[in-house]
Image (cartoon, rainbow, N blue to C red):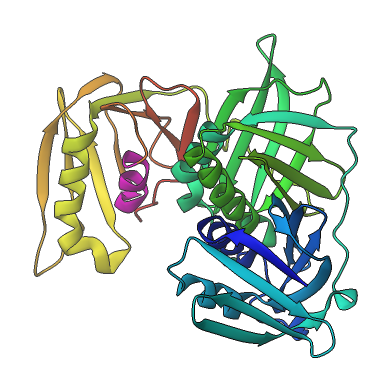
Amino acid sequence: MKISIELAKLIDLADIASRFVAKNATLPILQNIYMKASIDSLVLRATDMEKYIEIEMPCKILAEWAITINAKTFLDIIRTIEEKEIEINVDQKSQIMTIKWQKDNFEINWIPSSEYVALPEVPNDNKITLDAQMFSQWIEKVEYAVTDKNFSPVLTWILMKSKIEEDSKKLIFVWTDSFRLWEYKILSNGNDNEFSLIIPKNSINDFKKIADYQITKENNEIQVKYSDNLISLQFVIDNIKITSTSLLIQWNFPEYDREEIMPKKFNTKILLDKTICDKSIKKIWILTRDINNFIQIQTEKDSITISSWKTEKWAWTTTIAAIIEWDPITFWINGRYITDFIRTMEWDELLFNIVDNQKPLTVEDKWNSAYKYVVRPLINN
């Protein structure tokens, strides 16, 4: 029972599938990839019981079979092969897979596919379409604002919701680690149903991996389905169908758009060059990196002064040009939070919107209103 398959394509897809296997599973089969040869296609599946993937790719099938194989071992082996095409043989009696090319043979034991878990189905009732390029970009811009470990599970997840705003339907993505919050809005072309879904960060990162692969193949459309407890993204790439599904968290995301969390009325605005600001803050890091990157920002008539914490041994102050509107202000903030945002900006002008030195402030790319960044200042007693 054997198949013949293009190696480069198999490596790419096995690499994607391997991201979905369990890393420290007590059940060995959850560290395996399910492989099924059927008619004229090869199906790969993987899961860690929280997120799932199914890949269906066309290939030459000489006999039908279904097995599961250790994901890491399989991927490590095929990465060593330099041929364009390989032959895979499966022996049902000995339960051995043989990978063959030229004079070399690899033999790997496999586990019967009957022991593999079923993948969940998401109904077709609720659908939207996403642009792969945009999907990848907004994840890249904001993933730093989502923590991997936190006392609150909801802070390791990402909110995706739809909402009618200004007579148009918006798709909104929100992240927070409780010290800062990031909101991104795009126009939605989905159905008229409003929804609110909370997705694990790990699932979002794996979705991005597939979207990036899709972009390299110049296909830019992602079909999204969702239900009360599942979200599923479908990608079609060179006749390869990839369906990735994740469990949703059953939780109420914090009501972040209240005035006390995301203010809309401000007493001071600061506009400055992002590159100069970035360099100034990084200079001060030499002194502040051991004290959580605390910096002080003080407005002058046409400039701001950025300074470090003053001690008996050192202090650092730098002044840069800025446009200041309305009331003067002095506040403390984590400098790294600002440089994190700067590296995601597309344009050159950085805008601070400030209520006072104790309430959250918003940081924006002046010429891009699609996303907003909210940071809590530090209270200097």
Q: Nearer the viewer, residue 280 or 206?
A: 206
Return the x and y of residue 112 as percentages of the image width and height: 84, 80
Seen from the viewer's position, the closer of residues 109 and 228 is: 109
Q: Is residue 307 magenta?
A: no
Q: Residue at x 49, y 81 (%)?
A: 103
Q: Quadrant of residue 2?
A: bottom right
| Prevailing SS of the magenta stretch | helix
Which residue is pictured at 9% across the width and 64% down the height?
A: 314
Which residue lies most toward the bottom here? 94
Q: Which residues are magenta?
A: 332-343
Q: How many tags in the picture?
A: 0
In percent of width and height, residue 380 lies at 34, 53
Residue 89 shown left or right of residue 76 in the figure: right
The answer to whether residue 180 is visible is no
> Along the horizontal axis of the image, is 37 left or right of 155?
right
Residue 68 visible in image: yes
**Residue at the (16%, 45%) spot, across then down:** 279
Q: Position of residue 237 (x, y in %)?
A: 62, 40
Query: Does residue 342 show up magenta in the picture?
Result: yes
**Residue 35 picture quarter:** bottom right
Which residue occupies 50% across, 50% down? 143
Quarter of the image that includes the C terminus: bottom left
**Which x, y percent locates residue 282?**
19, 52
Q: Quadrant of the N terminus?
A: bottom right
- Residue in front for this viewpoint, 108 or 148: 108
Task: Write down the quadrant of residue 159 in the picture.
Answer: top right
Residue furthest to the top in view is 167
Front residue of this view, candidates 10 and 234: 10
In the picture shown, does residue 320 fall above or below 16? above
Q: Up-down: is 128 above or below 280?
A: above
